[in-house]
Each structure stands twice: as C-alpha cells, then as structure tokens.
Amino acid sequence: MNTILSISLACLLVFCILSIMSHSLLKSAIFLALASAMLGVLMYMMGAVWAAVIEVSACSGLVTVIFISAISLSNIKKDDIHKQYEDEKRMRWFPITMIVGGILLIVIALAKDFTLTSALQQTTDHFKEVFWNTRQVDIMGQIVTILIGGIAVFVLFREEQENK
C-alpha cells in the first residue's frame, strides 16, 4: 500500500507541476483535473471515502468543465496569451525551487521514521454521524475550496473591470 501511495503522490506532484508550467490554458486545466483525480485516489486509499468522491466529482469533473467552458468563452486572443507567457523571469526559478524543496522533503522523510497516518476508524455506519462528527476536516476543506474559488472569480472580474 505504501508503494501505491508513493506512486500516487509522485503523480500528484508531477501533474501539479505540469499544470503550472504549461503554456496552454486548456492543458493546464486538464493537468489540474488529473492532479485532482490523484488527490481523490489518495483520499480514498487513506479512508476518506466521501471526501474522495466529492474531490473527484466536484473538483476533477465539474471544475474542469467550468474551466474549459470559461477558456472557450473568453475573448482572449492567442497572441495575447503568448505575450503573457513570454516573461521568463516569472517562471525561471520555479523548477529549481521545486527540485530543492522535493529533495529537502525526501531527506527529512528519510531522516526520521516517517509513516503516513492511518484513517480514523468508523465506529458507526450512520452516514449522518460519520459525515458531521468524524469528517469535519473534509467538510472544512470543501468550504475553503468553495470560498477560494469565489474569491478568485471576484478578483478576476475586478481586475478585468479596472483594465477597461
């Protein structure tokens, strides 16, 4: 199981890096969906079944569809997008930072006896009790995700109105 978790974490990291480094908005959205799907796999394997279902259905599916729809509906010309990505200073240090951070995390994990925490064991089969009593962190994660999305949309629309 640790091998599968390690492979899933590595895939999650690769998809996250590819979503940031991609010069195409469409490819970035697809890599982000793949990263979200890998996160759902990790949640499922660690016992957070309902959080995994919500992650895969909402974040990996619904959000990706919304991203792709927004990309197709936007009136941004391809030349304007390429001009924004020509700024190499913005991303020059990102791969080096990610590599150094990854090496540091591996060294710290190998230096200590690092083990992944096991999921909380369910004591009841009632969905209501499990959802509201033992999965509060999952609920808070979903609330934070929704709020971040709303704030991002607000900031994007405000910047667009200021530019006009």
Image (cartoon, rainbow, N blue to C red):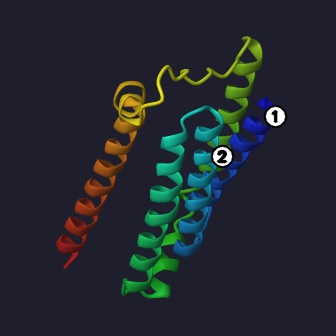
Q: Which mark is residue 141?
A: none
In the shown orientation, is residue 57 left or right of residue 14?
left
In the shown orientation, is residue 159 left or right of residue 135?
left
Question: Front-most of 21 and 68?
Answer: 68
Q: Which mark is residue 3?
A: 1
Q: Position of residue 163 (x, y in %)?
A: 22, 74
The span from disc 1 to disc 2 (Cα, nearest Å) is 15 Å
- Amino acid type shown at disc 1: Thr
Question: Front-most of 155 and 68?
Answer: 68
Q: Position of residue 64 (x, y in %)?
A: 49, 67
Specify which label sits upstream in the sequence, 1 or 2: 1
Outermost top residue: 112
Residue 100 found in image quarter: top right
Quadrant that contains the N terminus: top right
In the picture of the structure, the residue carrying the numbered disc 2 is 13
Q: Nearer the viewer, mark 1 or mark 2?
A: 1
Q: Is residue 93 visible?
A: no
Is residue 9 shown above or below 95? above
Outermost right residue: 3
Asked if the residue under mark 2 is in contact with the one under mark 1, i.e. CB atoms within 8 Å, the reply is no
Question: Which residue does the image show at 62% across and 59% down from the upper left?
Answer: 34
Q: Dot 1, how many residues are within 10 Å of its Cα: few (below 14), some (14-19), or many (20+)?
A: few
